[in-house]
Amino acid sequence: MDTISVTRSMNDLGMPIDTLERRVLQAGDTLAYDQLMIELLDYSIEERIKWSKIMADKYHYIPAYTDYLQQLLMKSSHNWRELTQGEKDTAILFINQAVMHGDSLAVELKKEFGLQ
């Protein structure tokens, strides 16, 4: 009996990315968002930034607020000064939103980077 070898990324959770994206965009599906962020580890960081911003802006999903800042920091090698003013402004807005909702990671990030 012949066997077929299938190579899959360890980040592949089985649901097509376009399905996850549609569920996130159309319904703010938090489980789909969490899966999508894992799936996108194999893609450009810009994709993770885009989707975290969508979930934070459109659906006010608390983890997406901190995801956005963390992705920006990864993009800039954790150098706050390398971010654009627009990225900084959005990150500060999102972190403050997460802090208002009691997100402990947001509190830590705010302290670490001296965000107002």
Image (spheres, helix red, strand yellow):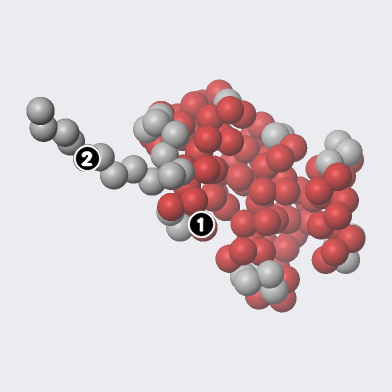
Q: Residues within 10 Å of mark 2 (few under 14, many from 20)?
A: few
Q: Is residue 53 visible?
A: yes
Residue at 62% x, 57% y is 71
Q: Residues within 10 Å of mark 1 (few under 14, many from 20)?
A: few
105 up-or-down from 72: above or below:
above
State the residue in front, 41 or 55. 41
State the residue in front, 101 or 13. 13
Q: Which residue is mark 1?
A: 46
- Residue 60 x %, y %: 71, 34
* 10 relative position to 3: left or right: right
Q: Amino acid at mark 1?
A: Glu
- Residue 1 x %, y %: 10, 28
Helix, strand or loop at mark 1: helix
Residue at 61% x, 64% y is 74
Total marks placed: 2
Marks 2 and 1, the one that precedes in the sequence: 2
* 107 relative position to 22: left or right: right
Residue at 71% x, 40% y is 63
Residue at 70% x, 56% y is 69
State the residue in front, 109 or 5. 5
Q: Which residue is mark 2?
A: 5
Q: CA distance from mark 2 to mark 1?
A: 31 Å
Helix, strand or loop at mark 2: loop
